[in-house]
Every structure is written in structure tokens, then in C-alpha cells.
Amino acid sequence: MEQEVEVLVYLGVFAFIGVLLKLAILFNISIKSKIAESFAVVCILFLVQNVAEFLGYFTVSSSEQLSVVFIHIYMISLYFIFPSVLVLALTLVEFKHLGSAKVALYSISSLISVAHFAGFIIDGVKFLGWSAITTPGAYYWFAIAFIVLNAITALIVLFYHYIANSSFEIRSRCKVNLLAFSPMFAVLCIVALFRLAGFNSSLAISMPLATIFFLFVMLLQSNGNIFWVSLRFKIIMSVLTLKNISTLDEILRNIEKIRITEALKASNGMQRNAAKLLNVPPSTLNKKIAKYGICSEDFHGVSVAQALRSRSTA
């Protein structure tokens, strides 16, 4: 038993680190849009989940009953987290009936929470050497299905608009969100499948890592910093893979060309917007585009679906 408690304390420390990281992300959100508001809600819910997890692990040695209370709070947070992720996805694609969707999703989450408190979702909690495991109740799989369905719907919404939406900006948002959300979705599905197969699988380690990745990427997007992080990464990779380059001037010219092309990609080929991204006058950018023989029209955004249709008719 002492060894089990020691392992749970280590998990509690891991959860506490997650709390600190999520607090840092939350305090760096600049709420200037509906997207940022929806993202802040997701971040707060993840923070509540992590705090409940941390307190659940750290109180088990002194009071198992108190620890079980925090595990229940952790479970209830899940009923709201994935609907909030779906709401974020709907906000990103500018869904017309966003208000109605919020009411419907959070109402179902509230009903499941009431059922949880009434003992219909889980029958109890047992502590193993590596985690706390819930014992399924009568409607446990209904609650899990609701969580997974929200996650799948969010992925479908994002993927559909990434493929078919005519707006370059919305497609870019969906691309980033798909990248951020995929690890979290994979963890959720794998753990759900293992539980369905009868294994005592837990989200104790994998989900916090996936959620921190999700929140960090979405923070960059909501605060408008995703372009610069992506640009720095591409510049580093370009410099590392350069061949037959012997002078510093050639390296600098290559970096400058990458900056221009990435800015044009991010701004849908609009030179004025690209100049704002790079913080240079439009006239300066025009001269550099001419210098490197870059065609800005090549970066005018069309949806993937439109591109496929145009190729099929060609």
C-alpha cells in the first residue's frame, strides 16, 4: 500500500506541473475575439480537471474519501471539456447557430453531471498502484459515448471546413486546430477502447501531455503568434538542410526568401497583409518580391476541394 501511495504522489506532482503550465497559458490568453473567449473556456476547464486530479492524488494517503470527491470532480470536468472543444471548433468555422449549439451541448453535459452525482455513471473508484480507476455504472458508456461523439464531431467539423471552406483564414484555423487536437483525440479513443476491452486504462499521464500540447498550439493561434513560431521552425530546418552554400550572404538571402514566401502563404497572397506580418513597408516588400522573382499570385488561397475539382476538369 505504501508503494501505491508513493506512485500516486508522483502522479500528483506530475498533475501539479500540468496545473502550473495551464495557469501560465491561461494568463497569456489575449481575449480580443470570440475565438479567444471559447479558447479561454476550454483552458479553464482543463485547469479545473488538472487541479482535481492533483488534489485527488495528493489526498489519497490522508483521506481516501476526500480523494474520491476530487476524482468525481475530475470526471465531471470531462463532460464539459469535450463539448467546449466542439464549441471552439464551431467558433473557428464561424458557425451561424453557435449560441443554440452551446445551450444544447452544455445542457446535456449538465444532465450527465446530475446523473453522475446520482450514482448512475460510476459505481465507485478504486486505487491501483499507478492510477485511480472508476468502476462503470449503469449509464457509464452513455457518458463516454457523449464525450467521444463531441471529439469526433469536432474533428469532422474541422476537417470538412479545412477541405471545403472557401475562406483561406478559416481553412488555416482548421489546419492548426486539427494539428493541436489530434493527439488528445487519439489518447481519448485509445483509452476508451482499452476500457471497453476490460483493461484498467487511465488518462493520468497521456491526457495531460496531450492537453498541454493542444492548449499551447491554440494559444499561439489565438494570440496571432503561430505564424512566427512556424516561420522560425522552417528557417531552422532550411538552414540545416542547405547544400552547396558557402557564404553568409547566400544563407541570409535564403532566409529572407523563406520569410517572404511564408508571409505570402499566411496572408493568402495579399502583399499588403504580408507586409504587415513582416513589419515592413509594402513598397519594400514589393521590391524584395521582384528581387527574388516570387509570384504572389501563386499563394492566392483556394480550398482543397476547389483545387481537386480544377485538376479533375483540366
Image (cartoon, rainbow, N blue to C red):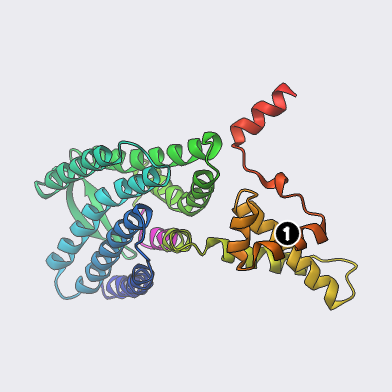
Q: Is residue 34 above or below residue 142?
A: below
Residue 291, how many percent across, how many down? 82, 61
State the residue at coordinates (37%, 72%): 14
Q: Residue furthest front?
A: 283
**Which residues are drawn in magenta?**
201-211
State the residue at coordinates (80%, 57%): 290
Image position of 50 (left or right of 188): left
- Inspect this view and state whether residue 122 appears: yes
Residue 207 falls in image quadrant: bottom left
The residue beneath circle 1 is 286
Residue 266, how many percent across, how many down? 60, 54
Task: Give yes or no for residue 237 being in the magenta stretch.
Answer: no
Image position of 179 (left or right of 144): right
Residue 84, how many percent across, how many down? 31, 49
Report the number of numbered marks. Answer: 1
Q: Is residue 230 above or below residue 169?
A: below
